[in-house]
Structures are given as structure tokens and as C-alpha cells.
Amino acid sequence: MLLTDPAFIRRLESLYLLARKVLGGTLRADRKSTRKGAGISFADYSEYSIGDDHRAIDWRVYARLDSLMIKLFELEEDIIMYFLLDSSKSMDSKFLYARQLVAALAYIALHSMDKVVIYGMAEELIVVTKPTLGRGKTLGVLQNLEVAKPFGVGTDFATAARQLCRWHKKKGMVIAVSDFFFPGGFEDGLKFLQWNNHDLFCIQVQDSEDRKCRLKGDVELQCIESGELRQLTITNSEARAYEQAVIDWNDRLSEFCATQGIGLVSTTTDVPFDRIIQSILRRGGLVS
Amino acid sequence: MIFLYPGYFLALLGLLPLIAVYLLKVRPGRKPVTAFFLWREVFDQKKNTALSNRLREILSLLLMILALVAVVLAMTTPEIASDQRKDLLLILDNSASMNARDNGRTRLAVARKTAFDIIRSLDANQQAAVATVSMDVQYQSHFTTSPKVLIDAVRGIEQSDCPFRSEALDTLAAGAISMDSCRIILISDGCSFNADANDYIELVKVGSDQENIGFLICDIRMLQSNPVKVGIYYKLASSFDKDIETDIIITYGPDNRIIKVIPVTVRPGINEPEVYTIDAGGPGQWKASLDIQDALANDNVAFLALQPKRPVKIRVESEHKFFLVNSILAFAQTSGELEYSQENADVVLSNGLIPQAERSIIFGIKESSGWCGQVAKEINNVIAKIKIEDHPVLSNCDIDSMPFIGARDINLPEDSLVIVETSEHVPLIYRVRQGQRVAIVINMDPFESEFYYSAWFPIVVYNCARYLMGRQDTIASACSIGDSISIPTTQYGNETTAVTIGHGNEPFQLSGSSYGPIRKAGFHTLENSSGKWLLGANLFASTETLLDNKDVIDTSKPLNRGRPLSATLAILALLLLVIECVLYHRCKFG
């Protein structure tokens, strides 16, 4: 299915309507800024100090208490959503599914007036969509996603994370969509992003072939990314060992995210993407 | 080793494409995987995979080469021995000595296995027959190419109680078997086999020299009836190389009541006979058993039948009875085999009268009757001539010294059997029958000839009385297997006798006056109109007991045995292919 197909866009619209109903139209429902500043919603009082805006002084309080107090309002700031779309070769079979997920989340974000940036991620980051804001840019974003292709030999998540932080000083919501089969591990990259005050949400996309070994007998295994070859006779014990290794790897990701307060959704390509988005929305958005 | 079809070696050329295919190395299918780094953990657990894969490829090639070579060799039909593939007559010795145990198995079982091995090695065109030999040769199967028939025949061979008689094999030399196209294989322990006289027979020797003790002779006799005294005579043989002390257990009756235990020391070889007296028991079944566990059990028991005294009761019909009665009393008082009885007599002894009894001994015929036809004048200068030699009536008698004075010219009646006659064919002693009645007529006047004073007179009476009662041959208490015995009968060969072997077995009917040769050890019961008789049959053969086959040489020429080599090679090829299939399956399907 094309990402710019009207039928697909109608499915995205449905998801956005669900987002409005459930989360008030924004993916960051629980993520209102804790900083105080100019806004319209009263938040708190604070003692006046030199340099504060005189317009914020509450004179009624001064008349009653004889001290200068200023009104604080919730700071309303637009959030940037950074999408890291794993575009390595290992995502070949899952790339469409991953792009559908990114498209859905980006659609909701754009309609919620959030800024969206989408990067393709392999050994480095490649821009898929530059920082974009507003509903009018939705079709362009979808077109960019539609033409995106896997690239690179391997995935270096830590390097990609550093690259993102170098390019974007402003903190935001980083959404990594990947199978998380990173030979160098995922911990360094995620920690680095957290250290740079980004909120993180991981969507792990795998297919059934990743989790279940259906190979038997003599095979020559080839790494889809590096092209490395290795001959092996796969019996039931080898198949079980591989499947256990995948389970252990996924458990490692789950435990890491849970301990670090990172949101995580794991899915396979068998599950329709909109069901995953609905699940995220019903859980309260992109939260841990 | 020879190959019947060496042309099939050309099939080894098939190795070339086989090796070529393997050298091309069909690589396994390439499978791209996303989580290759996770597979590395599996590789680490199987570090030797590459080496084992390479070895497996070599092993696979080796297995296929071996399988092909095995198949080709099987097609060439190799044979280790230069067997000429003649037809075979397999003769299995099933004599008593083949029941001896060698290493827990009887020699017959070993012989059967040897026969099976030979039968399995027969090729499709080779015929064979199976026979057994002990006292005589008995065919168990005809000549056939069917191994099943032959194996069934071998399986059906039963152990015989009979001793081996080498002469039985002589019938083969005179038989219709062509030695040019047939080999005669005797599978035997070789005890008493005469290899020199039977050089056309190849002996396949089974069994080795074994230690055994057994009875060679055993007999029992009533020494005194009141009080009872029984004499036992026995002779033992031993193949042990030292003296053995054991016991002979004497039992009596069907319930085997122990009467006596006789300690004996058995020396190596054939021992001197011994006699032992027992003050118990009576007529009937006796057993003498050696209390020893040795190689052969058949000769450890002697079956003895002590015959009861059955005197022939004789009545005298004569004007002058004195000498006639005394002739009876002579045997009544000594052996007790005759009894003078005026009532319930079995036989009537008459002189000058015509008795009406069923069985009669008639002297001094003077007038015509059914026993003698027309009686004419007295004849003189009688010269007696024996017509039937060895007739029981003449046993222990000197006919030449018998004075046939007073003999008359007699017209012989019908159904008569002349035993002694004159040179003019006047019957002097003859047997005559009238329906169920029978008489021995002695054509002389014992008074006139003073034959009463002759020592032969009571003997003639005794012989005639025993003959008329059918007891001319006494049944021994023990006989050897292979013996034939005369059945006591009053019907002179026209009687049917029921024979029962052992206890509880169904009797079989036997016609004629002879029973034998006896083939089964144990007690045999004979029953007919003249009475019931017990007989003990025993092995009693030194060649069987001594089990001596030390010097017997296996004279068999090269002979294929066991499963044909080609079949073994085919099985090997199949096994190799199965292993290769397992490897292939592992390669393809893990």
C-alpha cells in the first residue's frame, strides 16, 4: 500500500480522531511542559525578582500581603518529534511496516501542531523529512516516507544518536522505529539521547522470521547487512539456541527500557500497524 | 577367494561419476539472516562445525564408495572356499552320543547349526537332501533346491536313543547316489564312524572329547522267590581320566521306590562287571540309576524288567504216568518253569491216548485220529532226519541219540509242520493244528524204546510244553537298543500284539512274532493273548558311553558354510546406504 494512498490516509485520519478523543488531540497529553512562562493557563505564584515582567505582578496580592508576587503561567511550547527510522538492510522485510507506523505518528503530530523531523538511520542519519510543522505539510511528509529506501551496510545506533544530538540542540521526543538488532548494542545510543534530555520511545518491529528459525539442515548463513558467510548444520538444538538468543535479546531491550523509563512497544509485521497505534494511544500516548 | 561372475567388476566404473559428483561439492543453500550476530552465539557453541562438516563430506563420499564396492562384489558372487557346488546329501548323526552336551549345547544342536550354515550357503542351482543316521539311514527330505524344505527337515530331526552303526552307511555306497555329482556330508561326533570303510563320505566333526560314565550292561534276575532275593549284574564304563566315586540307586516299581544305594568306584575305561544281591522287591519294573552329572544322560539309567515266574501247567493222560510226571517235576523243582497240575492245565502230556485239550504233547500214537490221519504199520530201522533246523522243540536235544522205536507210518494230516522225519518222509516229530487246538506229535513208543530213561526225554517234554505256550524264547530283563525279540505267542506268528512304550503312551499294534529292532529306551509293554510282558530297553553301547572322538579327524573338503558372502556384502551395502541416508537427512532436514 502506498503511503499517499487515500485509503491509507483515511486510516491515518481515523487514528488522529482517536487521538483527539483519547488524548485531547496530542500525542504529548501527559507531557505538558513543566517549565513556567508565558501562557494563558495559571500555574503558580512566585516572588518578584529583578528582571521579572512587571505585567505579571499581581497587585491584588500586593495590596493584601504587601509583597510583590508575580503570576506564573504554564509555558506552552511546541515540541519536536524526532523519528529515527531504521533503514538498514535488516529492515528490508519490515521497512514498509515501519514507515506506516512513522507515517501514522507523524500524521497525528502534524495535526497536533507538533514539529516533525524524520531521519533514516543506518551507519549514519539521512534526512527523510526536514523539520516540518503544520497540517499542510502532511502530504509532503508522506511522500518523503514513500520514497525512502533502506541504505547502508549496518546500523550504528550510538553514532546515529550522537549525530542527532549534534544536529538538534533542542530537546524533543525521539521515536526510534527499528528491529533493534544492533550488533553494537542499543544501550549506548538510548542513554546518550536520554542524557541530552530527549524523551524516548522505542517501537520494536520484527517479523516472524526474526523470532522463529525455520531453517533446517545444512545452510550457508549470510548476514543481510555485512554479507558475512558461515556454513552451519541447523538441527533442532541450533534452532532452539537461536530462538532463545532472540528472546534474550528482546528481554534485554525490555528490561533496559523499563529501568530507564523509556517507552517501548514490540510488534511483528503480522499485526496491523493501526492496531499498534491504537494501542499506543490507549496507553496514554508515547509514554513509558 | 574365487568370483563366480568377475565380469561385474566393470560396474566399479560407476565410482568415477560418483566421485565426480562429490568433488563438485554441492554447496548448501545460502540463507540471508537479519540477526547474524545472534547466530554467532550458536556458532560459538559449535566451534568444530566447519571441521565436522568437512569430515562429514569425506565420510559421505567414503560411505557411497564402500556401498558401491560392496554391491559390485556381491554381484560377482565371491566364494572363500573352492566349493565345486555339487549336490549335497547332508546326513546328521542323531545317535545317542549326539545327546552329549558340549559347552551347554548338545552335539545334535551343534550339528543342526552346522547343517543350517551349509544349507544357507547353497546357491540357487544346488540341490541337497537331508537324512539322519543312527542304526540306519532315514531320509528326512528329498533332493531339493528349496532351503526352506531343507531347514524344516533339519529342524524336524529328533534325538534318537539308538547307537551309531557305521554299517548303516554302506547302503549309500550301493544306492543310486552318483558320487560324481553329489557329495555326502556326515555331520557327526564321529564316535564309531569307520572313516576308512566309508571314504566316500566326508565327515564334519562336531563335539569334543567329554567325560562320561554309563552302563554297558545291566541285568536283574530272581535268585530266590521266597524270601525274595534279586541279583543285579552290571558293568560300567567311564571316559574320565581318574577314578570316580558315585552311587548306583536301585529303584523298584512304577513309583521308583528306592530299594538300595550301591556305592561304586568307577575306573577309567571299561570296568569289570559286578554282581549285587538285594533282599527286596519282586517281579516288575526296576531301575538302576547312576547318581552323577556327566556329558551323556542316556546311559545313566538302566531299565530292568524282572519277569515273574509263569510255569506251564501240564496234565498227564496215560496208563503209566510215573515217568511222564517225573519228567515234568524235573523242571518244576529246579527252574520252576513247568508245573504238574491235573486241573487247569495249559498242556496235556499223553502217551498212547488221544487228548482233547487245546494243547497236547502226544507220544505213542497207535490209532488213527485227527492228529495223525491214517496210522499204518510200525516201521523199523528209523533214521531221523531234522527237517527244520533250530526248531525250539529240538533245542538242547541230540536227535541222533533218540530211539524212534515204535514209530508208525503215518499219513500226515492237514495243517501240519514236520520237524523231524525219516529218510522216507515218515514224520517223526511234527506239529499239527485243528482249529484252535494244537499238538506236538512224537512218533515213538517211549516205553518200548525205553526213552523214559533218556536224559533227552524231560528236555523234549520241556521244549514241547514251552513251544506250545509260545514261551520258547525267554524275554531278558534288559535288552539293548537295536535288538529284536521274539514275542511270546501261542498263535505261531498270526497274532497281533499291543506295544506300549513308557507310561501313559498310546499302544500301537504289532503283527508277527518279532518285535524290533527296538529304538526307544525305557520300559516296553507287550500284551497279547498269551499274556503281558515287560521289557527294559537300554543304550548299552561302549562307543556311545565313552564319547571318545579324540582321534576322529574332520575329513570334509572345502565347503561353503553360513550366509553367502554376496548376501553379507549386500547387507553391508544396505547398511552403508542407511548411514549415508541418515547423514543426508541430517544435512537436509537437520
Image (cartoon, coloured by chain):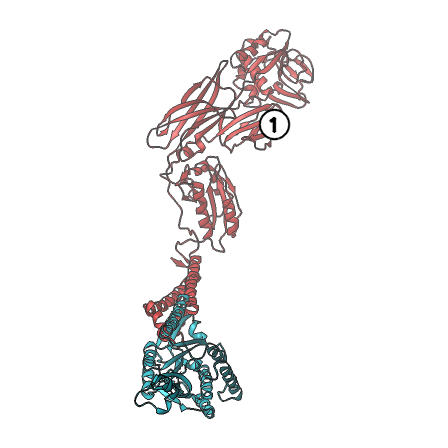
Chain colours: A cyan, B red
- Mark 1, secondary structure of its residue: loop
Q: Quadrant of the N terminus of chain B?
A: bottom left
Regarding residue B480, the answer to whether it shows in the image is yes
Of all chains, the one bearing label 1 is B
Residue at 58% across, 9% down: B325
Q: Quadrant of the C terminus of chain B?
A: bottom left
Q: On the image, which quarter does residue B207 sit in?
A: top left
Is A1 located above or below residue B150 in the figure?
below
Q: On the image, which quarter does residue B566 sit in?
A: bottom left
Tell me which amino acid carries mark 1. Gly
**Residue position marked by numbered label 1 in the rendering:** B493
Is B27 placed left or right of B520 in the picture? left
Q: Position of residue B526 (x, y in %)?
A: 57, 27
Q: Position of residue B339 (x, y in %)?
A: 57, 13
Q: How many marks?
A: 1
Q: Nearer the viewer, residue B3 or B408?
A: B3
Is B498 placed left or right of A144 in the picture? right
Q: Position of residue A117 (x, y in %)?
A: 40, 88
Is B50 located above or below residue B272 in the figure?
below
Q: On the image, which quarter does residue A62 sit in?
A: bottom left
Regarding residue A185, the answer to whether it shows in the image is no
